[in-house]
Amino acid sequence: MADPALLTVGGTLLSGALAVVGVQTYASGRAQRQALIERLSDAGPAPRAGHRRRFARLDRRLRATAVGRRLERRLAATGLTTSPAEFVVYTASAAAGLWLIAATALAAFFGPIAALVAVWSAFAFLTWQRQKRIERFINQLPELARILANATQAGLALRTALGMAADEMDAPAGEELAKVAAKLAVGHSVDEALGELADRLPSRELVVLVTTLVLSHRAGGTVVTSLRNLTQTLEERKETRREVRTQLSQVTATAYVVPLMGVGTLLLMDRISTGSIERMTDSFWGQAAVVVAFGLYGTGFFLIRRLSKIDV
């Protein structure tokens, strides 16, 4: 009776030990797989402690579609940690909430308009966030060119210089260069990694820098002199862009004030004469007048923004 008991205890301990080893191996493999996906993904590393991904099932379904992948790349260019599923759910919730508020506070006719404005505002926010990130990256380009010039002058390879710049620079340049270094680490060429960087953050300055690095890498010549000259040029363009932005700040403010004046006038009219908006939108001509008015305000906004846009 003792031998079977010992065999049973030994078998149980061995099974438990193998189970522990199996769980550890599975967890390690899953972590390595996730790390590899993060290194190859345009969205960058997933958020760590303090931010838990929500709507994971919906997120997987969205990433499997072409629209979801485009949205993922657009979110990645903004530097936000929001997943495509979170963006879709939050946007839909905001649209539904504004629909109810507008339909209750003003009239039922304004519900769909408020929902469309909410959706447009969400994507406009992504565009603004992306442009803001591009501007910050452009401001860091002179420092990046200086670091690369010093590294190459010291005899370091371009791949090593890019990795060193990723460690030394702050966001967003540090984050974007870290993605480039991760691409290079898994076998991508310098042309592909830098080309993807230029696609994520399109700008003339970055295209010039990427072209300089790619041509120098292909030709095998020295890149120090080119980077030194490029650093000075980028500094001058940075100052010019700042001056142009300051001169056009009043025009930019006007583009936002004009539509807000129209909405404010509409609310003031309903405040003075309660129910006037609802009575106005009961008829077809009243609804048509509101749509035309909003269309004209929107056209004025885009025209002012277009005329005040100066490419430097």
Image (spheres, rainbow, N blue to C red):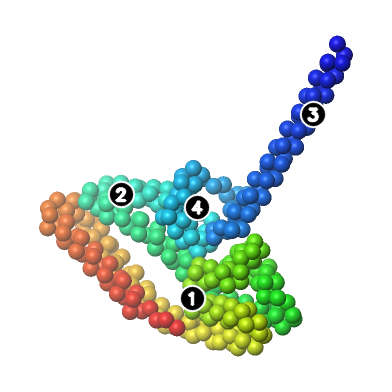
Secondary element type, mark 2? helix
Q: Cα distance, mark 3 to mark 4?
A: 43 Å
Give the alpha-carbon distance from disc 4 to disc 2, as whole Å: 24 Å
Mark positioned earlier in the residue sequence (3 or 4): 3
Q: Which residue is mark 3?
A: 14
SS state under label 3: helix
- Of tags 1 and 3, the one toward the viewer is 3
What residue did someone put label 2 on?
Answer: 99
What is the three-letter code of the residue carrying label 4?
A: Ser
Disc nearest the viewer among 4 and 2: 4
Q: Is residue 122 left or right of residue 277?
A: right
C-beta proximity under 8 Å, tags 3 and 2: no
Camera-nearest label, 3 or 2 = 3
Contact (CB < 8 A) between labels 2 and 1?
no
Q: Quadrant of the N terminus?
A: top right
Residue nearest the observer in this picture, 272 or 151: 151
Circle on res. 83: 4
Q: Amino acid at mark 2?
A: Trp
